[in-house]
Image (cartoon, rainbow, N blue to C red):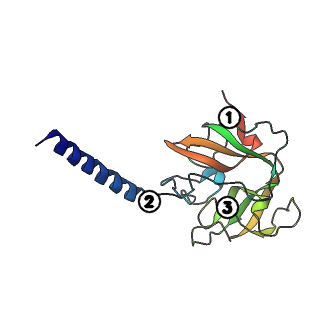
Amino acid sequence: MSTHGLLTRRTALVGIGLTTLAACSGGGGEEMPGMDHGGGHGSDQGGAHAGHAMDGGAPPEGIAQAADPTYPVGTAVTLAADHMEGMEGASATVSGAFDTTTYAVSYTPTDGGAPVNDHRWVVHEELDSPAQAPLAEGTEVMLRADHMPGMDGAEATIDSATDETVYMVDYEADGMMMTHHKWVVESELQPAS
């Protein structure tokens, strides 16, 4: 067999392999399989927050960028939050800093998932037609956040509120890169060491 024939066969095999790999990967909207989002996310069910998108997307409309955040966009930080497995102690980069009211909420997902207690965090701009911030503990709201499956459109109860600067961060956990992770409040960040 000629060298040209061998190269053509190898090229074809590589092409088939790449096509198969692309078909198996499923394309956009990648999720982090197997992530246990219990702990600080407040789920009573370990893994109830599995399916968190790897890219959190843009901030919600109407949210105000922080004028003078402690950690400006691009700042390297260490995460002190434990919302998801592998998060606490992870190195991160700030990808957004905002001034708003941030809430911990309890809700039952619209997709039939197990109830989620003390989910951290949802910002005021991710609530459907809310009253003026801050909302009191126990206030019932409708979520318009989509960081977790079954969250958008779910009825929720406010567990607590904070007016700390809230951040989006990019970080790596268990070999997977999370970008624009929503949300981490200022007390959950430390300067990078």
Q: Is residue 27 left or right of residue 193?
A: left
The location of residue 111, given as percent across then percent down, is 58, 72
Q: Which residue is mark 3?
A: 117
Callouts 1 and 2 close, C-beta under 8 Å = no
What residue sits 58% from the left and 58% below the top? 49
Question: Label 2, label 3: how many angstroms apart (C-alpha)?
Answer: 31 Å
Circle 2 residue: 26
Choose between 129 and 17: the one closer to the eye.
17
* Amino acid type of the residue that numbered disc 3 sits on in the rendered structure: Asn
Q: Is residue 5 left or right of residue 172?
A: left
User: Vertically, is 167 above or below 47?
Assistant: above
Q: How many marks?
A: 3
Q: Which residue appears farthest toward the right when viewing the image?
A: 132
Q: Earlier in the sequence, mark 3 or mark 1?
A: 1
Q: Residues within 10 Å of mark 1 (few under 14, many from 20)?
A: many
- Residue visible at 63% across and 38% down in the picture: 92
**Picture coordinates of residue 173 (x, y %)?**
54, 42
